[in-house]
Image: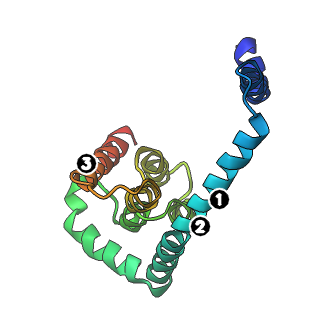
Amino acid sequence: MEFILFLSDFIVPLLVFYIVGFGILMKKNIYDDFVKGAFDGFKTVIQIMPTLIGLMVGVGVLRASGFLDLIGRWIGKGIGFLAFPAELVPLTIVRMFSSSAATGLALDIFKQFGPDSHIGRLASIMMSCTETIFYTMSVYFIAAKVRKTRWTLAGALISTLSGIVAAVILA
C-alpha cells in the first residue's frame, strides 16, 4: 500500500520528466511541440464554445422554469412500479446533457434526502454509472469533425439505461 501512495504522489512529475527525457533522446524540439499542441487545443476550445454555451443555457432554462420537475413528476408516475424514485427522473434527464447541472441536482437531492439515504446512494451510483451523452457527442464529434454517427446515440442511450439499472440494483 505504501508503494501505491508513493507512486500516486510522484506519477505526474515522473511522467513529465519521462516525456521531456524521451523528447531529448529523440532530438525533438519539446517546447515547439508543446506550443503547437497548446495552440491546437485552444482552437478546439474556440470551436466547441458555442455548443457548450448552448447546452449550459438550455439546461439552465429548463431547470429554472420548473419544466424538469414537471417532467419528473409525469414520468415518475409512469415508472413507479420499477423501483425507481420519481425524484431522480430530473437528475437522469439532466445527466444526459450536463454533468455540472446534474451535480447541482445531486447536491439538492443530498440536501433534501441525505447522502446516506436510498435515494442519495442511488443518485451517487447513477452519477458514476452514466455519461453526459449529448454533451459528449456534440463536443467531441464537432472537435473531431465526425459526420457519420450512425449507432452512437442508440449505443449511448442503451449504456446509460444499463448504468441506471445497475444503480438501482446496487443501491
Residue under numbered circle 1: 42
Q: Which residue is at a point 40% across and 57% down the rendered structure image?
A: 145
* Position in image of residue 106 (x %, y %): 52, 60
* Position in image of residue 139 (x %, y %): 46, 60
The answer to whether 70 is drawn above or below residue 29 in the figure is below
Element marked by disc 1? helix
Q: Which residue is at a point 48% across and 76% down the rendered structure image?
A: 54
Element marked by disc 3? helix
The crowd level at tag 3 (other Cα within 10 Å; few <14, some 14-19, many 20+) is: few
Residue under numbered circle 3: 155
* Position in image of residue 48 (x %, y %): 52, 65
Q: Nearer the viewer, residue 20 or 171?
A: 20
* Position in image of residue 133 (x %, y %): 38, 57
Q: Do the residues labelled 1 and 2 touch (CB within 8 Å)?
A: yes
Residue under numbered circle 2: 46
Three-letter amino acid code at the position of disc 1: Phe
> Is residue 71 found left or right of 140 in the rendered image?
left
Which of the two labelled residues, at mark 1 and mark 3, occupies the earlier sequence position? Answer: 1
> Is residue 47 found left or right of 86 in the rendered image?
right
Three-letter amino acid code at the position of disc 3: Gly
Question: Which one is closest to the eye, mark 1 or mark 3?
Answer: 1
Alpha carbon of mark 1 to alpha carbon of mark 3: how far? Answer: 30 Å
